[in-house]
Image (tube, rainbow, N blue to C red):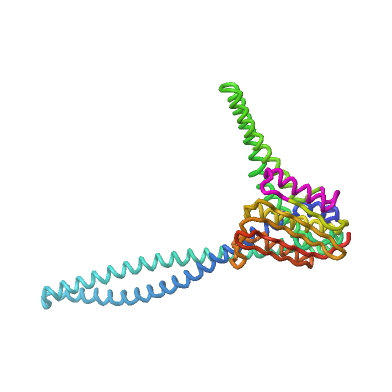
Amino acid sequence: MSKHKLTSKALDEIFEKIIGTVGDSKNEVYRLSEDARQEYQQIKEELEVLKGKVLETIEQGDKLETQARLARKRLSDVSRHFQIYSEPEVKDAYEKAHELQTKLLMNQQSEYQLRNRRDELERRLLTLEETIKRADHLVGQISVVLNYLTSDLKQVGEIVEDAIQKEYFGFRIIEAQEEERKRLSREIHDGPAQMLANVMMRSELIDRIYRERSAKEAMEEIRDLRKMVRSALYEVRRIIYDLRPMALDDLGLIPTLRKYLDTIEDYNEGKPRITFISIGQEKRTASKLEVALFRLVQEAVTNALKHADAKEIQVKIEFNNEHAILLVKDDGCGFNQEEKKENSFGLIGMKERVDLLDGTISVHSKINQGTLVMIKVPIIAA
């Protein structure tokens, strides 16, 4: 690969590594940006109140300073000519001067604390402004990547190579790629790598149990170890599917979906039961459409597994001359569509992907009556 020019093959390799995971990063940036905006608004409101208190404290301090100065002058006069003043007058002058001086010191201390808090909030606002700016910039970068990932790769190659000549688009791709590599690295470290480390520890434990206790107890540990290895294998396969299911290019959409859903059902030991129905003659369509339909099924099924507590999930896909129609239905707990869900980024990502395909998506759900996701997108020829 040339130092100044990316080839279409190199771009394909980049896309294959980040497709399917970049959407999760976008959702995470959305959350960080929203949290920063809320905190910014809260601090801004607190700062306005604090500035008012600072001004009020300064005004009070000026008044106290004037009063204290007059009281000190009065006390000085009384002290010099104490023979013409009565004892109560001398005592009163002293007490007033002392009281005003004490109030002035307390005012100055309060002003000092308020100014420090004000400066601290102003510094925090500057930090949040930078965070929001960087988050918005990153969202823009990820959105550009997502738009191009769902278009024809050959066309993307031509567009990107043209953009590289303008010296800006290539940097966006590279930054997004590096962010996804970091996220994937963390996911592998916290998932399969951690599980395999535990497998090594458990294997040593099994050896000790076999030697020091009994073969029966060792066999019980081995059964637990099998579950752990199975979980690690599932996590590895899930990460591979998140990057890009290799069978999609070789076998096509329907066989890949069937294999994916079978894997999910096997891992969950048939709970919930997943049924898959394909209607109409499947024809190989544009790569971006096959990828998009696979991701839509993946996201809808994942949502049902995580949130629905369903006994059965039905996946149905139908092809006609003009459209592909996708239905994902579960018999789970459902949700109230009138209530705004805080973490509905999965549905948001699905809607964005369908919009890019010029399709439509509808979600129907009621409490304790399950959820139905229906998607209709135009067929794009291969």
Quarter occupied by residue 279: bottom right
Q: Where is residue 298 in the image (x, y as percent from the top left)?
A: 73, 54
Q: Residue furthest top?
A: 211
Q: In this view, does 336 lie to the left or right of 161?
A: left
Quarter occupied by residue 319: bottom right
Residue closest to the eye, 366 or 24 = 366
* Residue drawn at 19 percent across, 74 percent down: 93
Up/down of 248 relative to 37, above or below = above
Q: Give the main secondary structure, helix, strand or loop, of the magenta stretch.
A: helix
Q: Position of residue 158 (x, y in %)?
A: 86, 62
> On the rendered image, what quadrant is the C terminus found in?
bottom right
Q: Position of residue 186 (x, y in %)?
A: 65, 47
Q: What is the span of residues highlighted in magenta in the rendered image?
A: 247-274
Q: Is residue 74 left or right of residue 260?
A: left
- Marker count (numbered): 0
Q: In this view, does 72 lie to the left or right of 176?
A: left
Q: Would residue 337 be seen by someone viewing this image from the given angle?
A: yes
Up/down of 359 relative to 3, above or below = below
Up/down of 141 relative to 73, above or below = above
Q: Is residue 237 left or right of residue 121?
A: right
Q: Would residue 32 be seen by someone viewing this image from the given angle?
A: no
Q: Does the magenta stretch include residue 230?
A: no
Residue closest to the eye, 67 or 325 = 325
Residue closest to the eye, 28 or 238 = 238
Residue closest to the eye, 314 or 297 = 314
Q: Position of residue 73 (x, y in %)?
A: 24, 76
